[in-house]
Image: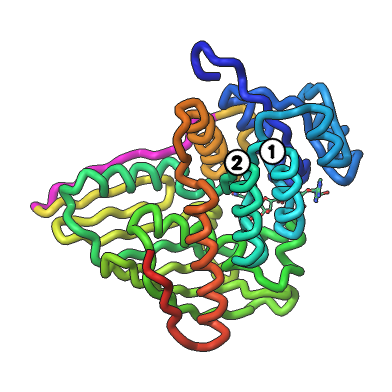
């Protein structure tokens, strides 16, 4: 909790696999979870008991009416996002919505408009940019001493069994770009700025799933920087490091690299090498192999709370995150058409 201020009252909707980490993280960030809600009542009841939360509900409208939270944290899968955000708009309560923000750009626009009309803020839970190593990279780039970036690679190639904890990933029509690529595309925006053009090639390698499990995306940023985004769950690796992202950014006067083990390496123009250890802090509730991601949920919650207290916009405000979603959409269009998609200048 921020000094001298009452704890922000949060209602968490969605008590599945990832909702647990949101509950731990809100507690860690000093907010008060006043209730949980899940359409499957038993899940809500179990979570309330596990986290000693005073109220649980199976219906989000009833939960909002009964609890009058300061913010609704939506941790359901994408199919329910629009209806839940529009519900928040009707109740004039702030909302944070998990990624993928919306099933389409039209849905995302409608959600943003509804919340704007209700004059309540809407953010997206886009946590990748809040991973400690990504923050270190962003800070080093912002110092400017490495010069202008001209090329970059942002890569998560793995064979981790993501379908075990998240079975819907095997049956969703759109898989790796919407689910994981969205994080990598947002990280590209965070480190390298807005994007002017997108070219994408996808493959479905695992015949047992419905969507694409490998995507290679070339971005031309508005600055002229080129970045390659690699997302794959069809990569046989010697050492599995899921969910770590590996990154290389080449600049005019040096380079930055994010290696396995959360190690950031900066090579300066004169060949001076600096190393930064960006390990997530140990916490009793972190579960392997996801500590890096779970820590980023705490960091994002804290960021949101700080901006709420200051009356300023968090980085993942929905109007900004819409540009990340536009990259997801452009990547699918590009892959289907075999063409480069040019985005509207901002
Ligand atoms: P899940 O299926 O395990 O849990 C979702 C829960 O929401 C279910 O229990 C379901 O009953 C409930 N639900 C659905 N519609 C509802 C409604 N209208 N009202 C109340 N409850 C409802 O899913 P999950 O794996 O926990 O994923 C949730 C979201 O989190 C997904 O969008 C996923 O992409 C995202 N996710 C994000 C990260 C990250 O790092 N940001 C990691 C994993 C998952
Ligand atoms: O759902 C995905 C996410 O947001 O991060 C990794 C993941 O859990 C599986 O791709």
Is residue 58 or residue 153 the one in the foreground?
58
Q: Residue placed farthest to the top in the image? A: 4
Q: Quadrant of residue 12?
A: top right
Display coloring: rainbow
| Numbered circle sitting on residue 119 | 2
Q: Are marks 2 and 1 in contact (CB under 8 Å)?
A: yes
Q: State the predominant SS element of the stretch in magenta.
A: loop
Q: Magenta region: which residues?
A: 270-282
Q: Of all residues shown, which one is farthest toward the left?
A: 270
User: Is 36 colored magenta in this rendering?
Assistant: no
Mark 1 lies on a secondary structure that is loop
Above or below, 148 against 135 in this view is below
**Residue 207, position as x, y percentages in the image:** 71, 79
Counting from the top left corner in percent of width and height, residue 39 is at: 86, 46
Q: Quadrant of the C terminus?
A: bottom left
**Picture quadrant where residue 103 is located:** bottom right
Please tell me whether residue 269 is drawn above or below residue 340 in the rendered image: above
């Amino acid at each position: 909790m921020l000094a001298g201020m009452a704890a922000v009252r949060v209602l968490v909707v969605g008590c599945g696999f990832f909702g647990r980490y949101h509950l731990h993280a809100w507690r860690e960030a000093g907010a008060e979870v006043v209730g949980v809600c899940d359409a499957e009542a038993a899940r809500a009841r179990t979570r309330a008991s596990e986290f000693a939360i005073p109220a649980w509900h199976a219906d989000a409208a009833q939960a909002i009416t009964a609890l009058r939270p300061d913010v609704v944290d939506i941790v359901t899968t994408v199919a329910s996002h629009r209806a839940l955000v529009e519900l928040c708009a009707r109740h004039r309560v702030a909302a944070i919505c998990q990624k993928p923000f919306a099933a389409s750009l039209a849905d995302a626009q409608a959600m943003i408009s509804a919340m704007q009309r209700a004059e309540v803020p809407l953010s997206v839970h886009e946590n990748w940019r809040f991973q400690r190593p990504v923050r270190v990279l962003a800070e080093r780039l912002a110092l400017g001493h490495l010069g202008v970036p001209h090329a970059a690679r942002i890569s998560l190639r793995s064979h981790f069994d993501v379908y075990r904890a998240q079975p819907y990933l095997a049956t969703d029509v759109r898989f790796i770009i919407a689910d994981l690529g969205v994080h990598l595309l947002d990280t590209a925006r965070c480190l390298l700025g807005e994007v002017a053009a997108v070219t994408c090639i996808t493959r479905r390698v695992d015949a047992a799933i419905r969507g694409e499990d490998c995507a290679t995306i070339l971005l031309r940023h508005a600055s002229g920087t080129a970045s390659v985004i690699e997302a794959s769950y069809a990569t046989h690796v010697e050492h599995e490091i899921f969910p770590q992202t590996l990154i290389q950014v080449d600049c005019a006067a040096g380079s930055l690299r994010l290696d396995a083990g959360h190690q950031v390496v900066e090579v300066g123009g004169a060949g001076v090498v600096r190393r930064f250890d960006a390990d997530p802090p140990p916490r009793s509730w972190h579960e392997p192999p996801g500590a890096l991601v779970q820590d980023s949920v705490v960091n994002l919650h804290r960021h949101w709370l700080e901006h709420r207290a200051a009356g300023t916009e968090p980085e993942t405000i929905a109007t900004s995150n819409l540009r990340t979603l536009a990259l997801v959409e452009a990547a699918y269009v590009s892959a289907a058409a075999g063409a480069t998609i040019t985005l509207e200048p901002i």
